[in-house]
Image (cartoon, helix red, strand yellow):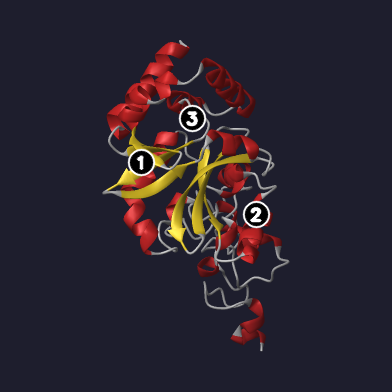
């Protein structure tokens, strides 16, 4: 069964990305086919066994495990290339192994470089084995440290849109790289879980618990669920713990307000005048 699955991933990797993936080894660049048939196949058996042992310890998602086994060397970098430009980097296996305990609930495996030290990190959950994108890096040590402190104990399933397959990650990066690089505020959908309230018009500006009903002005449901306690309960049970990515938390709320993590500034609703994204409670004209 494993051999059948291995062949399926092998064929998919070559069929869809054979001419889009390059491998870097000791500062030399190879296309995928050249590397697999000219370099990797001659790997020493002792090195191969040590490599397989590292993969076992990491407990990688199945697809990712097979891709690393296809590459076959711990000090190689897989790079997704588009129009001659490197757009996504899959880290060396030895680097993934060394940093496996850097975060409590996920392992980092790669990144998209945005420039000036800013990156979009790529990781997978240690529990669900699903993948996600996140804003990371920074122009200085303070920004990098701030990101790390936000993420080190974070459960990614609660904050980020999760992707089932590593090929979903490749696909999104490859076909959206131009808009990703154009502005750091583009492609919010790549990060956000989004609101699951029926008929929500701005689902990427808040989570389900951050949705304010236009009828009763209570959070966690919309007009179509209002008064239907069963539907409201289902929304709460299934999506009540969802949060926004940290870089999108509301800046109109005070920093010690817990629910600032369930909406962005544009979705902030003033409790006095009911206007959205305009001002905080303290700056409302009705409170003066």
Nearest to the observer: residue 160 or residue 142? 142
* Distance between mark 1 and mark 2 Cα atoms: 26 Å
Residue in the picture at 38% in, 17% down? 7
Reading the chain from its start, which is encountered first: label 1 or label 2?
2
From the image, tell me which residue sits under label 2.
148
Rendered location of residue 202, percent (x, y): 44, 60
Q: Which mark is residue 239?
A: none
Per the image, label 1 sits on a secondary structure element best described as helix
Q: Distance between the Cα atoms at labels 1 and 3?
A: 15 Å
Q: Position of residue 262 (x, y in %)?
A: 60, 58
State left or right for residue 176 relative to residue 132.
left
Q: Image check: 29 left or right of 105? A: left
Where residue 184 appears, as percent x and y from the top left, is: 44, 63
Where disc 2 sits, the SS reads: helix
Q: CA distance from mark 3 to mark 2?
A: 24 Å
Name, please, the residue furthest toward the right. 256
Residue annotated with mark 3: 64
Picture layout, residue 102 above or below residue 68: below
Which residue is at 64% across, 77% downward?
281
Where residue 81 sits, quadrant-wise, is: top left
Instruction: Say whether disc 3 or disc 2 marks the residue closer to the N-terminus.
Output: 3
Q: Locate the C terminus and report the quarter of the image it occupies.
A: bottom right
For the point 60% across and 26% down, which residue is it? Answer: 54
N-term mark: 1 or 3: 3
């Amino acid at each position: 069964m494993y051999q059948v699955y291995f062949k399926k991933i092998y064929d998919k990797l070559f069929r869809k990305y054979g001419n889009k993936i390059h491998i870097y080894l000791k500062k030399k660049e190879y296309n995928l086919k050249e590397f697999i048939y000219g370099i990797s196949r001659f790997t020493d058996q002792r090195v191969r066994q040590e490599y397989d042992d590292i993969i076992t310890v990491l407990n990688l998602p199945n697809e990712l495990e097979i891709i690393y086994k296809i590459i076959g060397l711990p000090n190689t970098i897989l790079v997704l290339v588009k129009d001659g430009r490197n757009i996504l980097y899959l880290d060396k296996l030895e680097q993934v192994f060394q940093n496996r305990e850097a975060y409590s609930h996920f392992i980092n495996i790669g990144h998209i470089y945005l420039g000036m030290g800013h990156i979009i990190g790529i990781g997978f959950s240690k529990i669900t084995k699903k993948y996600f994108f996140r804003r990371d890096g920074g122009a200085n040590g303070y920004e990098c440290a701030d990101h790390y402190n936000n993420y080190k104990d974070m459960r990614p399933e609660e904050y980020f849109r999760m992707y089932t397959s590593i090929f979903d990650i490749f696909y999104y990066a490859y076909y959206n790289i131009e808009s990703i690089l154009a502005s750091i505020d583009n492609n919010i959908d790549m990060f956000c879980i989004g609101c699951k309230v029926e008929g929500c018009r701005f689902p990427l500006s808040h989570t389900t618990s951050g949705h304010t009903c236009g009828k009763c002005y209570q959070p966690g449901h919309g007009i179509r669920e209002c008064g239907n306690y069963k539907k409201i309960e289902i929304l709460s049970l299934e999506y009540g713990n969802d949060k926004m990515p940290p870089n999108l938390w509301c800046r109109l709320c005070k920093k010690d307000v817990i629910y600032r993590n369930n909406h962005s500034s544009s979705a902030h609703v003033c409790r006095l005048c009911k206007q959205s994204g305009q001002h905080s409670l303290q700056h409302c004209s009705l409170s003066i």
